[in-house]
Image: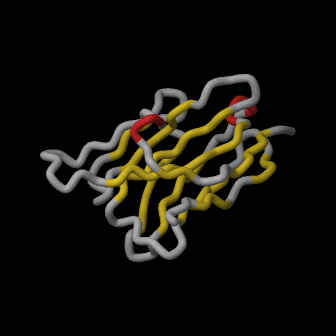
Amino acid sequence: QLQFVESGGGLVQPGGSLRLSCEAPGFSLDYYHIGWFRQAPGKEREGLSCISSSGGTTQYADSVKGRFTISRDNAKNTAYLQMNSLKPEDTAVYYCAGQLVDLYALDDMCVMRGSEYDYWGQGTPVTVSS
């Protein structure tokens, strides 16, 4: 049973930083594109970033571009979301998700569309407040 697990959320002041981690205990992440999403109270789920299974391609939403960085270390079987210059509007529950790679795909492109992802974590809350 594959399940993704996020960690690293918490309370941080505006302008601060957090690094979120994503793991899938007992499974290899090598064959999954990884996406990061968030959902704030009363708002729809928002795609933030994704990274292809090889790490060769990344995508960012305009709302986080230049502040957030997605990465992965397949040797450690972990994906990350480094969040800098955090703003109160970044307050949300953050989720990582995995999309199983199509071995016959002709590119290494990931997408930030939640419906494309098969496996999700439980979410880790991030609160940005002074």
Q: Is residue 63 above or below residue 68?
A: above
x, y (%) of residue 89?
Answer: 71, 29
Q: Residue at point 73% right, 45% down?
A: 126
Q: Residue at point 48% right, 67% down?
A: 78
Label tally: 0
In the picture, measured across the screen, residue 25 lies left or right of residue 100, that is right
x, y (%) of residue 112?
Answer: 42, 36
In the picture, measured across the screen, residue 74 lies left or right of residue 86, that is left
Q: Is residue 60 above or below residue 7?
A: above
Q: How is the image coloured?
A: secondary structure
In the picture, measured across the screen, residue 72 lies left or right of residue 14, that is left
Q: Is residue 119 above or below residue 64?
A: below
Residue 71, image quadrant: bottom left
Which residue in the rendered view is the most extreme toward the right? 130
Residue 9, image quadrant: bottom right
Which residue occupies the foreground of this view, 97 or 78? Answer: 97
Q: Residue at point 42% right, 45% down?
A: 50
Quarter occupied by the C terminus: top right
In the picture, measured across the screen, residue 130 lies left or right of residue 126, that is right
Which residue in the rendered view is the most extreme toward the front? 1
Which residue occupies the foreground of this view, 105 or 126? Answer: 105
Q: Residue at point 71% right, 37% down?
A: 92
Which residue occupies the foreground of this view, 124 or 104? Answer: 104
x, y (%) of residue 111?
Answer: 36, 37
x, y (%) of residue 11?
Answer: 81, 49
